[in-house]
Image (spheres, grey):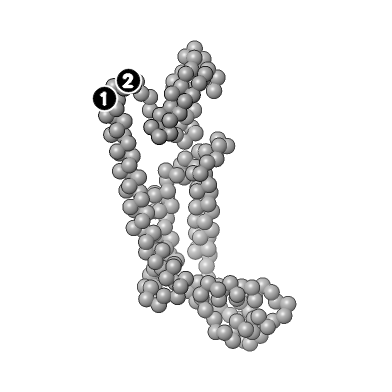
Amino acid sequence: MPGVNQVEGNFGAERVSVAFDPARVSTAQMKRAISSAGYRIEERKYPGAQDTEDLEAAARRAEIRDLGRRVAVGAVLTAPVLVGVMGSFFGASWIPSILTNNWFQLAAITPVMLYTGWPIHHTGWLAIRHRSADMNSLITIGSTAAFAYSLFVTCSRAPCRQTGTGGSHGKVDHLDPHHRRWPASDAQDLFERKGDVPDAARALVFLGTG
């Protein structure tokens, strides 16, 4: 930024010191530039004063409380989804059906995505907009892509059904994770169908996730 001569940052103390030419740039302009990059900035009008230190300590405690609430909400809502998904993956029969319900999982994870992850997403998208991507951006892109794909699959999913005359002439139309296993004879029929690789490949994935 024109007018800024030197910048020294201390990430541990969350402070930055700037040497600048007030004739060329103002503190308000520097604040706007820093805020637009995704960072919250507060000017220390009286550095070293007790009141300043007390205000900064209170602000840090408030931020920690806010992050603690977000993590707690995320943990409570994620736990049942984790149990349902992992229990189903390992074939646990004691898992309540509600925990494997796609709509229940969507309802539980949406607040985690939007509320718990908001501080990271806010900073991540701002960093991407300013072409200065960081770890927040990586997390934001990955979690947004996963959430969007899961939302699409959940909203467009249809039950698994098999059409045709049976035996080696069966055809898979849709796959439903609530029906993760097929009889071995059906899967074998698909594997024996020479030249029909898509159905055999889908059956292999289907059985492997059961």
Q: Is residue 99 above or below residue 62?
A: below
Q: Quadrant of residue 99?
A: bottom left
* Residue drawn at (55%, 40%) of the image: 133
- Name the residue rendered at 38%, 32% in the picture: 13
Are the residues at dot 1 and dot 2 in contact (C-beta closer than 8 Å)?
yes
How busy is the neighbourhood of tag 2: few (under 14 within 10 Å), some, or many (20 plus)?
A: few
Which comes sooner in the sequence, label 1 or label 2? 2
Q: What is the distance, in whole Å, between disc 1 and disc 2 at their CAs?
A: 8 Å
Taking the spot 47% from the left edge, 36% from the top edge, the residue there is 38
Q: Amino acid at mark 1?
A: Asp
Give coordinates of residue 106: x percent, y percent: 43, 61
Q: Residue 108 placed where, x, y %? A: 39, 59
In the image, what residue type sits under mark 2?
Answer: Tyr
SS at mark 2 in the image: loop
Q: Which residue is mark 2?
A: 46
Residue 157 is situated, as x and y percent measured from the top left of the image, at 52, 67
Residue 193 seen by the camera: yes
**Which is nearer the eye, 39 or 167?**
39
Q: Is residue 159 visible?
A: no
Q: Is 209 left or right of 198, judged from the image as shown? A: left
135 with respect to 73 (left or right): right
Q: Name the residue carrying label 1.
A: 51
Q: Nearer the viewer, residue 137 or 122?
A: 137
Residue 125 x %, y %: 51, 42
Tag 1 secondary structure: helix
